[in-house]
Amino acid sequence: MTSQDGQAVATSSAELTTAHASAALLERLADKLGGRASVAAVFGEPVFREGITVVPVAQVGFGFGGGAGREKAGDKDGEGGGGGGGAGAKPLGFIEIKDGTATYKPIRDPWVDVALPLATLLVGVAGSKVMRAVAKARLGRHEKSD
């Protein structure tokens, strides 16, 4: 075996070890996060008060990623690595159980109550001005042709 063959085998072995380490890291992350992704993460613990049960409801998301590296051709100092992850939760509402009846009550974003009517008003005002301008232009053309 030549020294080049030995170097190629060593490089290939290092690449496999790095790839295996990256795959193992991703599997561990998936196991850890997957174990936490349960019904309890979306539906919180029920709260009991005065004959009413309230169960909080949320939207939960997880994400993660990893990386690897290897030696560059002709460069003995090549390395790599990396990884990261995150989770987030957003309250959506709650389920109210009262007298044997369950009712879902969403939590609305307060900006929706302000922005939607305001946008509708602006579209209405702008639309009416455009329609008046178009009608006026048509009337002006009609009078000139007579």
Image (cartoon, rainbow, N blue to C red):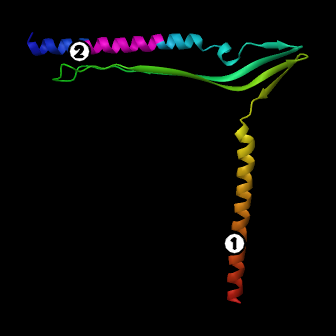
Amino acid type of disc 1? Answer: Ala
Q: Characterize the local packing of mark 1: few (<14), some (14-19) or many (20 or more) Cα atoms within 10 angstroms.
A: few
Residue denoted by label 2: 12
Q: Residue at x 31, y 14 (%)?
A: 18
Q: Secondary structure at mark 2?
A: helix
Left or right of 125, for residue 74: left
Main secondary structure found in the magenta portion? helix
Left or right of 40, for residue 11: left
Q: Residue at x 79, y 21 (%)?
A: 95
Locate residue 5, reporting x and y percent: 13, 14
Locate residue 27, reporting x and y percent: 45, 12
Locate residue 146, reporting x and y percent: 71, 90
Magenta region, residue range: 14-28
Q: Which mark is residue 133?
A: 1
User: Looking at this rendering, what residue extends furthest in the right direction?
Assistant: 99
Location of residue 136 by image quarter: bottom right
In-front residue for pair 106/113: 113
Locate residue 121, reporting x and y percent: 74, 54
122 relative to 84, above or below:
below
